[in-house]
């Protein structure tokens, strides 16, 4: 095995272009995937590249570096619109995992149960990608293309996530359902972000994960919620059930069958919207 640990991003691009190495950041996905076998081939460890870490605010919004850990995200002073992302950060495995696992690694692993994806979807996150040939950005909704599949091309590295200022408004919440409270792969998870004016929903963003090969937004439900008061969930219950049932086609696996997932998803969406609306009254 050849192991590379550069401190410069351009050097990392060159190594990747020359070797096609496996990219290692926190290592919390790549090592378990080896199933106790030795890690073979070339490995490019990007954890020492300082420009890939950290959370910064600009006029355009928020930038989260690719190697930023979930512990760093959970503890950062972020606006209420990013609360769902911080709540999800606290659900990623154990504290030890949160201290090592990175936000970009969670996305690049492209699991249907990736905790970071639903909250980033409601934040309209964009994925920043770099290579020797230059950089590009993709909406997160276009970056993850299937189970364990992404739009990354040979020689490319995810360098950051960007959250536009317009999506960093309002309040948000995240809920996750599993077979137990901690250290669990989700059966269903939901993120919701609301913008309220005088207690009325002006804008809504809802996403559901672990119910389809790729986490997805529910745009028809988001539109249908506009105009409802945040403190009257009974009023939007029928709309929620109609829209969610029409949009959700849950998968069945070892953790739950499709019908249970659909019932659970509708209830979890309802509770998460209520959580987000309550945050807006604090």
Image (cartoon, rainbow, N blue to C red):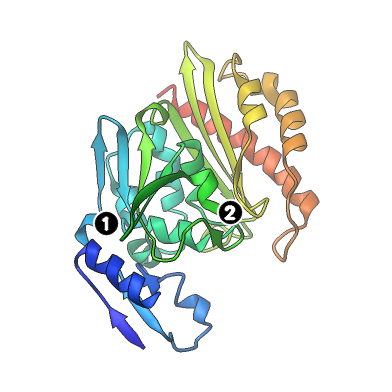
Residue where numbered disc 1 is placed: 52
**Which quarter of the picture shows residue 21?**
bottom left
Q: Position of residue 241 (x, y in %)?
A: 75, 31
Farthest residue in the top direction?
198
Q: Tell me if residue 210 comes above or below residue 2 in the rendering.
A: above
Residue 250, given in percent of the width and then of the height, sits at 73, 50
- Whether label 2 touches label 1, CB < 8 Å: no
Horizontal placement of 27 versus 145: left or right? left
Q: Nearer the viewer, residue 229 or 149?
A: 149
Nearest the camera: 41 or 201? 41
Query: Circle 2 is placed at which residue position?
Result: 145
Label 2: state its secondary structure. Answer: strand
Could you tell me which quadrant the N terminus lies in?
A: bottom left
Q: Is residue 171 visible?
A: yes
User: Label 2 crowding class (10 Å Cα cut-off): few <14, some 14-19, many 20+?
Assistant: some
Which of the image's four quarters has the C terminus? top left
């Amino acid at each position: 095995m050849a192991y590379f640990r550069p401190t410069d991003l351009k050097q990392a691009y060159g190594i990747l272009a020359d070797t096609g190495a496996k990219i290692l950041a926190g290592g919390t996905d790549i090592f378990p995937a080896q199933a106790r076998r030795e890690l073979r081939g070339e490995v490019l460890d990007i954890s020492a590249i300082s420009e890939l870490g950290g959370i910064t605010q600009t006029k355009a919004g928020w930038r989260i570096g690719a190697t930023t850990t979930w512990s760093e995200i959970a503890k950062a002073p972020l606006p209420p619109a990013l609360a769902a992302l911080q709540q999800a950060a606290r659900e990623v495995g154990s504290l030890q995992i949160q201290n090592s696992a990175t936000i970009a690694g969670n996305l690049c692993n492209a699991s249907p149960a990736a905790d970071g994806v639903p909250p980033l979807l409601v934040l309209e996150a964009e994925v920043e990608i770099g290579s020797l040939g230059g950089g590009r950005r993709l909406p997160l909704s276009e970056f993850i293309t299937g189970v364990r599949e992404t739009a990354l091309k040979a020689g490319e590295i995810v360098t950051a996530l960007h959250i536009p200022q317009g999506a960093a408004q309002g309040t948000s919440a995240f809920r996750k359902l599993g077979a137990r409270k901690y250290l669990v792969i989700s059966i269903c998870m939901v993120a919701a972000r609301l913008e309220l004016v005088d207690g009325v929903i002006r804008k809504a963003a809802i996403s559901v994960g672990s119910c389809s090969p790729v986490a997805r937004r529910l745009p028809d439900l988001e539109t249908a919620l506009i105009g409802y008061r945040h403190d009257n969930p009974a009023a939007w219950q029928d709309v929620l059930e109609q829209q969610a049932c029409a949009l959700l086609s849950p998968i069945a696996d070892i953790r739950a069958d499709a019908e249970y997932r659909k019932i659970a998803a509708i209830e979890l969406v309802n509770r998460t919207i209520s959580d987000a609306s309550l945050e807006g009254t604090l």
